[in-house]
Amino acid sequence: MLPFSAAAENNKRPILEVLKTAFADTTRVLEIASGTGQHAVYFAEKLPHLDWRPSDLDEHLPAIDQRIVEADMNLVNLLSPIALDVEDLPWPVSAADYEDAYDGIFTANSLHIVAWPLVEAFFDGVGETLKAGGTLCVYGPFKYEGKFTTASNEAFDEHLKEKDTNSGIRDFEAVNALAQKIGLILQGDHKMPANNQLLVWKRG
C-alpha cells in the first residue's frame, strides 16, 4: 500500500487557491520534499500551465513514482521525481541551464521537521536554483515575534522536539531573513487551515 498523508489530502485545496495566483506566471516548479507525491499529482492536474518536478530523498522516490503511475492521468506536465537532499549543494538542477531552470519552488511541511542548518541549506539551494523573477512558496506553521499563533501549535512544537530536539516550528522573522539574504521579497503571508501559513516570496 502506498504511503498516505492525511494532512496533504486536507490542505491541498486551500494551498491550490493560493498557488493559482502565486504561480500564475510560472512555467516550471521544483517541489522540495514531495513525500507521498499527493501534492505533486494534484497540483500538476490543477495547474496544467506549468511543469511540476517532484523531489525527495532517494528512499521516497519509488513511492512517488508508483503514485504517479496509479494516478493514471497521463499528466504530461508532471515530471519524473529526482533525488534531492537539501544539504547536498549545489542541488542537481541549475538556474544557469535554461532547460533545467525553475521559476517556481514549492515545499510543504518541511522546515519544522528538519534541523535549522538544513533550513539554511534549503534557502542556499533556492538562491542557487530559482531564476530571477521566480516565486518561492512555503507552507507550514510559524511563530511570530517568538510567539506561537495557537496553543495547539505550541503543543505540536513540544511533540516535534520530543521526537527530535533539532526540529520545531520556526520563527517567521528568522526564515524571512534567510529569504531576504538571497534577494527574495515577501509577497504574501496567507492564513491557512489547521493553524498553518503559506508564505510567498518573489525574487527580484
Image: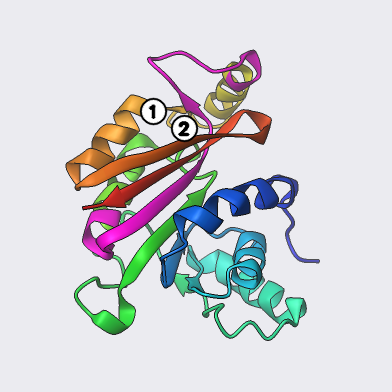
Type of amino acid at the residue the image marks with label 2 = Ser
Q: Is residue 197 left or right of residue 2?
A: left
Q: Is residue 88 at all visible to an observer of this figure? A: no
In this view, the residue in front, 51 or 24, is 24
Mark 1, Cα crowd under 10 Å, few <14 / some 14-19 / many 20+, is some
Distance between mark 2 and mark 1 Cα atoms: 15 Å
The magenta-colored residue range is 126-153
Q: Secondary structure at mark 1?
A: helix
Q: Secondary structure at mark 2?
A: loop
In this view, the residue in front, 182 or 188, is 188
Mark 2, Cα crowd under 10 Å, few <14 / some 14-19 / many 20+, is many
- Counting from the top left corner in percent of width and height, residue 60 is at 57, 65
Q: Which numbered disc flags the more N-terminal residue, 2 or 1? A: 2
Q: Is residue 193 above or below residue 45?
A: above
Which numbered disc, 2 or 1, marks the residue closer to the eye?
1
- Counting from the top left corner in percent of width and height, residue 77 is at 55, 80
Q: Residue at 62% across / 60% down in the picture?
A: 39
Q: Is residue 30 at all visible to an observer of this figure? A: yes
- Counting from the top left corner in percent of width and height, residue 184 is at 25, 46
Q: In the rendered structure, does residue 8 fall within the stretch colored magenta? A: no
In this view, the residue in front, 105 or 62, is 105
Q: Residue at 18% across / 41% down in the picture?
A: 181
Q: Is residue 149 above or below residue 185?
A: above
Q: Residue at 48% across / 52% down in the picture?
A: 107
Q: Are marks 2 and 1 in contact (CB under 8 Å)?
A: no
Type of amino acid at the residue the image marks with label 1 = Phe
Give the labeled residue for mark 2: 167
Q: Is residue 26 left or right of residue 70?
A: left
* Mark count: 2
Q: How is the image coloured?
A: rainbow
The label shown at residue 172 is 1
Q: Is residue 116 left or right of residue 149?
A: left
